[in-house]
Image: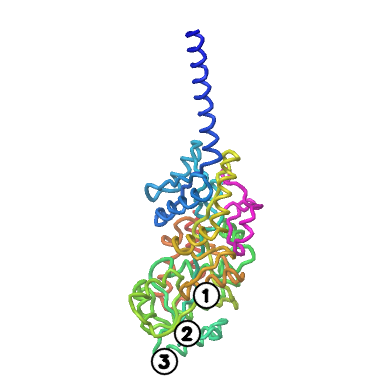
């Protein structure tokens, strides 16, 4: 009897261990998700949001922290070793292409219907990235010195710069940093093309030239106007560009919504500001882009995928999740169903442009790696140094710089 009882006890114990093991696997797949994201400044906020979700839904959310600047390499290693997170960050189309076998198709998810026009990440026709939030840039302008009708096309733009110069005010300020000098402003002619990605691919292959394309020919005229009527940006860094605008010495700067925080050091500016489009070929849209996207690991089992989808839905539709996105993360929502209150004037104009479809895309993420600092910036510096160089010759020099970057 004792032996039989002992044998039964052992069998029961083994059964319990096996059941516990199965239960643990089920729990991991269906009742736990892991989030690995690249924006280190919101790590603590993400952990707090995870606790809110767990309290409300009973599903554990584990937040992995990145150990440095090599987030993407860490992510690739984890995914390839079958130890990938449930939800991860994509930085744009290039990263999206590299990891497309791990990206779950979000196209049919209800929460994707709330994404602002053209702000989701699409790879091979599938919506695979839910935007974190938006950023954007254009002509940040002093409303006491400039009105929207003053910069609606090239003629009005050039006249405004000329008139302001006559009054002792700098019309439009760029600054010497590579992206602020050329990358952001050069985005506009690319973004106005019917198919920017196709054009960039042909440009990479030497099949087209910017100098032969009307959008860039018009851009050349704008750059000539800026050089003739405004200060030399090579003599201005970002801080000085901001300072001259804040003190009324410059009427407009080509900058993004991120610049607003710089004005706090100047107290009450004494004027209101807003953001307008660069009116290249009558463009009336602001350049809006998404720095990062949320993606779901298609390599996970379906229970884990479903749990990840539920988390993203909750984060973007619940009152708690929306509050975190706006107030804790500090994002400008890329979702039309999220109301953002108390935004600064630049972010407010940006959000309005995004939600109304009055936006053009960022294209520089499709440019050859390293081209801005190594090739385009030196060509632009030469344009501002050599006053005899025409705008058309400048675009031709950008073509040469591009060819050098794609050797």
Q: Which residues are magenta?
A: 100-129
Q: Which residue position is annotated with label 3? A: 167
Front in this rendered view, residue 37 or 383: 37
Judge whether residue 183 is colored magenta.
Answer: no
Residue 148 % position (x, y)? 54, 83
Residue 350 % position (x, y)? 52, 71
Tell me, for residue 353, which label it has, or none.
none
- N-terminal label among 3 and 1: 3
Gap between marks 1 and 2, in whole Å?
Answer: 27 Å
Q: Secondary structure at mark 1?
A: helix
- N-terminal label among 2 and 3: 2
Q: Is residue 318 above or below residue 273?
A: above
Q: Secondary structure at mark 3?
A: loop
Q: Which residue position is annotated with label 1? A: 220
Residue furthest to the bottom in view is 167
Gap between marks 2 and 3, in whole Å?
Answer: 16 Å
Q: Quadrant of residue 228?
A: bottom left
């Amino acid at each position: 009897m004792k032996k039989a009882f002992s044998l039964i006890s052992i069998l029961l114990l083994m059964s319990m261990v096996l059941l516990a093991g199965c239960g643990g696997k089920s729990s991991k797949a269906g009742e736990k998700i892991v989030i690995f994201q690249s924006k280190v400044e919101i790590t603590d906020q993400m952990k707090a949001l995870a606790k809110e979700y767990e309290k409300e839904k009973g599903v554990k959310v584990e937040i992995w922290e990145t150990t440095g600047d090599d987030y993407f390499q860490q992510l690739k290693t984890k995914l390839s070793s079958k130890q990938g997170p449930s939800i991860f960050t994509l930085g744009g189309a290039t990263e999206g292409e590299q990891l497309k076998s791990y990206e779950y198709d979000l196209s049919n998810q209800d929460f994707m219907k709330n994404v602002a026009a053209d702000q989701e990440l699409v790879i091979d026709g599938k919506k695979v990235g839910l935007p974190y939030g938006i950023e954007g840039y254009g002509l940040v302008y002093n409303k006491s010195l400039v009105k929207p009708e003053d910069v609606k096309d090239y003629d009005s733009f050039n006249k405004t710069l000329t008139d302001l110069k006559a009054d002792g005010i700098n019309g439009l300020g760029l600054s010497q940093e590579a992206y602020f000098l050329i990358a952001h402003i050069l985005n506009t002619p690319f973004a106005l093309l019917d198919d920017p990605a196709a054009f960039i691919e042909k440009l990479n292959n030497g099949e087209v030239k910017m100098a032969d394309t009307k959008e860039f020919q018009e851009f050349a005229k704008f750059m000539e106007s800026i050089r003739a009527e405004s200060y030399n940006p090579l003599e201005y860094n970002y801080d000085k560009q901001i300072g001259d605008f804040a003190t009324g010495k410059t009427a407009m700067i080509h900058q993004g919504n991120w610049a607003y925080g710089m004005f706090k050091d100047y107290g009450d500016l004494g004027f209101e500001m807003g953001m307008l489009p660069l009116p290249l070929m009558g463009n009336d849209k602001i350049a809006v882009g998404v720095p990062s996207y949320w993606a779901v690991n298609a390599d996970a089992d379906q229970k884990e995928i479903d749990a990840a989808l539920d988390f993203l839905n909750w984060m973007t539709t619940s009152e708690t999740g929306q509050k975190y996105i706006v107030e804790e993360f500090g994002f400008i929502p890329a979702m039309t169903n999220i109301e953002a209150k108390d935004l600064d004037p630049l972010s407010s104009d940006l959000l309005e442009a995004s939600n109304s479809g009055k936006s053009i895309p960022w294209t520089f993420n499709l440019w050859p790696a390293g081209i801005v600092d190594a090739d385009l910036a030196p060509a632009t510096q030469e344009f501002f140094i050599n006053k005899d160089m025409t705008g058309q010759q400048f675009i031709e020099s950008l073509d040469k710089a591009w060819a050098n970057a794609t050797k």
